[in-house]
Image (cartoon, helix red, strand yellow):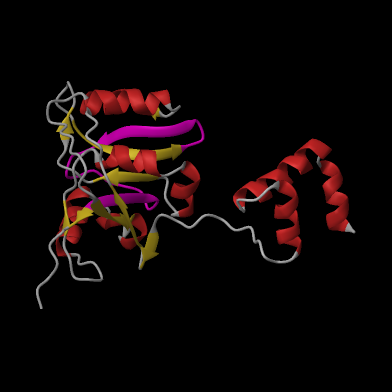
Amino acid sequence: MGRINELNDFTRGQLDAALMKIGQDAGMGTAEGIRAFLRGELSISSPPRSWREEDGVIYFSVTPDGADGETWITLLEGNIFLVEYCAKEVLRSPSFKSTNGVTTEVAVLKGMLFEDQCRITELIRAHAEAFRTPDKRKLEKPNAELACLIRRKFTDKEIEAMGLTCIVAMHEPINDSDGNPGLLSARRDGGGRWLNAYNGRSDCRWGRDHGFAFAVSQARPTE
């Protein structure tokens, strides 16, 4: 009876909307959707993840569409993302280069892989240089636009499901107007979905809940 009583928390309109959604997801009219659900022919499940995790490393792919830095600012802010001031300076730098149409496989090394004293940029990069994916491919510095693609690809809830608060693209640092090197990152925050820039110096220390994104080499090992 408890579950039935819980339905009293919803209005008739909300229940009708839920039933309509069941029908739409099944590609049927509402009535047929309900019948299919009651017959056990229709199940409700979460959409499949667009990423996977193996041994503390998260894998996924992204495909750029040629957007330059200024376009990224417009696109993100136009879709209620928050772009930090320092990130805008990185995006507007001549050193920010865009690419188009070439899919990049990405590996994100989770901060939990490193001891606290070893979670430093230069050591993380050294670890990435020695790291090999399950099919023996190497990790490389990504293009800076990777952070923008990650920010657009994943919601804050997805980044949270990864066990992370932010994903830092480990590209070649790009200086802001004051000459400070920055690394773009996608960060989840209670105040909104952020694209920001972190300290790109080699001695920068990171948190256990940070992830470090590298490009997976397209070259596969020869037999």
Residue 161 place in picture, x, y as percent: 48, 53
| Residue at image coords 24%, 38% | 145
In the picture, residue 87 is in which quadrant? top left
Lateral position of residue 80 relative to residue 135, left or right: right
Residue 158's spot in the image, x, y percent? Answer: 47, 49
Q: Nearer the viewer, residue 179 or 136?
A: 136
Placement of 32 over or under 16, stated as above or below: below
Tally of numbered tags: 0
Q: Nearer the viewer, residue 187 or 206?
A: 187
Image quarter of the N terminus: bottom right
Q: Residue at x 27, y 50 (%)?
A: 213
**What is the span of residues highlighted in magenta in the rendered image?**
189-214
User: Based on the displayed image, in which of its 4 quarters is residue 82 positioned?
Assistant: top left
Q: Quadrant of the C terminus?
A: bottom left
Q: Position of residue 171 (x, y in %)?
A: 18, 43
Q: Taking the image as drawn, is residue 11 in sight?
A: no
The residue sitting at 12% across, 71% down in the picture is 221
Q: Is residue 118 magenta?
A: no
Depth order, front residue of 95/4: 4
Q: Extreme left residue here?
A: 222
* Above or below, comparing residue 136 to residue 156 in the picture: below
